[in-house]
């Protein structure tokens, strides 16, 4: 065991270790939960292969249908995990999306993108965009997946995600703002929960954030991007620091509504506020809102959906996914 410890060449605490021989050891639970019909909410789920060539998969969620003729808003969701761990198929994310689908009454596609370090950035972005284009192929009602053909309203498409998944949602929305992307649908909104944004220069409370306050501390976050993106390891890469000097202007964000959710005790909280403020003054012609959970830490809702603050977050997200386009657009 001791010799094994000495072979570790990189570690993210409680997340992953990389050994000298190249073996990647992921330290988080992998309690896979099969798709089913939830007995409490009536939400049904099933797994599909989205892009066979690169084995991109997803879990689809359908709320209990009371009116088969009514189209429902569509949520494309990207899970968190520092781009290195987790899938839609483990219990925390399955339960979180199930509750969200029930509360918001939306159809959801929860995407399983490839993970670093085996598949470094930009693999996660490429997989997520491929999944979004697959979803868009159903917009005329003749795609390969009947749940989307029969129940999804492609005038009300949202992207959502937490942590690294929120980072993906932002970057896809930036790409969607480019008319040359080839995306055949528009995005109504994006909801970013505890978004993984960072930078080389501390902002707000980051400089004073004690490194022993939580696992997700300054040192942890400083090390993530250089590890997952060795081709451009700077923490001011615009994909992780959207307000960095020289980053694409946020005025080009390709959606009409944005909700940013932050947590009081998250080291990345002030990055979420900075994004909200920068988008507000960018000239972007949309509506941006921010919601802060008092007493919450990064990703608190994944550990337990029952506490009041987790329920409040789910309800706030559900209300966002029920909104229409702003009247002035």
Image: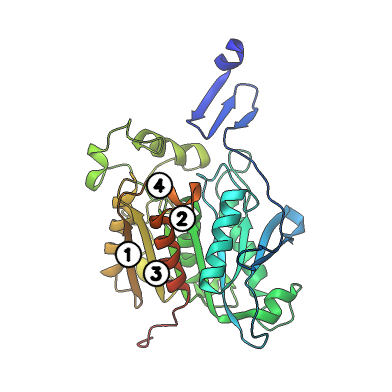
Measure the alpha-carbon separation of dots 3 and 1. 8 Å
Earlier residue among tags 3 and 4 = 3
Q: Is residue 230 visible?
A: no
Task: Residue at 37%, 46% (x, y): give it.
Answer: 297
Measure the alpha-carbon separation of dots 4 and 1. 16 Å
Specify few, some or many for label 1: CA neighbours under 10 Å numbering under 14, 14-19, or 20 or more: some
Residue 60 picture location, percent across and down? 67, 65
Q: Nearer the viewer, residue 217 or 29?
A: 29
Residue 167's mark?
2
User: Is mark 4 in CB contact (under 8 Å) with mark 2?
Assistant: no
Residue 290's mark?
1
Dividing the picture into quadrants, the one containing residue 190 is bottom left
Residue 135 picture location, percent across and down? 65, 70
Measure the alpha-carbon separation of dots 3 and 2. 13 Å
Which of pointers 3 and 1 indicates the residue nearer the eye?
A: 1
Specify few, some or many for label 3: CA neighbours under 10 Å numbering under 14, 14-19, or 20 or more: many
Specify few, some or many for label 4: CA neighbours under 10 Å numbering under 14, 14-19, or 20 or more: many
Measure the alpha-carbon separation of dots 3 and 4. 20 Å
User: Is mark 3 in CB contact (under 8 Å) with mark 4?
Assistant: no
Q: Secondary structure at mark 1?
A: strand
Q: Is residue 4 left or right of residue 289?
A: right
Task: Residue at 64%, 82% (x, y): give it.
Answer: 66
Q: Secondary structure at mark 3?
A: strand
Task: Residue at 28%, 51% (x, y): give it.
Answer: 270
Earlier residue among tags 4 and 1 = 1
Earlier residue among tags 3 and 2 = 2
């Amino acid at each position: 065991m001791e010799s094994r410890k000495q072979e570790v060449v990189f570690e993210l605490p409680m997340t992953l270790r990389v050994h000298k021989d190249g073996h990647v050891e992921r330290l988080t639970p992998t309690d896979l939960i099969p798709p089913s019909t939830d007995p409490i909410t009536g939400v049904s789920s099933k797994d599909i292969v989205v892009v066979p060539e690169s084995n991109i998969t997803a879990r689809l969620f359908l709320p209990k249908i009371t009116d088969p003729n009514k189209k429902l808003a569509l949520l494309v969701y990207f899970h968190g995990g520092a781009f290195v761990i987790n899938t839609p198929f483990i219990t925390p994310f399955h339960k979180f999306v199930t509750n969200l689908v029930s509360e918001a009454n939306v159809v959801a596609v929860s995407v399983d993108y490839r993970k670093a370090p085996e598949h470094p950035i930009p693999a996660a972005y490429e997989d997520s965009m491929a999944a979004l284009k697959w979803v868009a192929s159903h917009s005329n009602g003749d795609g390969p997946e009947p749940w989307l053909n029969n129940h999804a309203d492609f005038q009300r498409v949202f992207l959502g995600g937490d942590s690294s998944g929120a980072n993906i949602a932002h970057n896809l929305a930036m790409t969607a703002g480019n008319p040359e992307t080839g995306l055949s649908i528009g995005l109504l909104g994006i909801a970013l929960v505890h978004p993984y944004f960072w930078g080389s220069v501390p902002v707000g409370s980051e400089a004073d954030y004690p490194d022993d306050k939580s696992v997700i501390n300054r040192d942890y976050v400083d090390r993530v991007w250089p590890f997952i993106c060795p081709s451009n390891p700077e923490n001011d890469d615009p994909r992780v620091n959207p307000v960095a000097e020289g980053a694409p202007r946020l005025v080009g964000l390709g959606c009409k509504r944005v909700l940013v959710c932050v947590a009081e005790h998250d080291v990345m909280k002030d990055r979420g506020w900075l994004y909200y403020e920068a988008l507000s003054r960018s000239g972007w012609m949309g509506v941006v809102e921010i919601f802060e959970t008092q007493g919450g830490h990064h990703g608190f809702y994944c550990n337990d959906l029952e506490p009041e603050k987790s329920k409040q977050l789910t309800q706030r997200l559900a209300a966002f996914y029920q909104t229409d386009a702003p009247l002035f657009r």
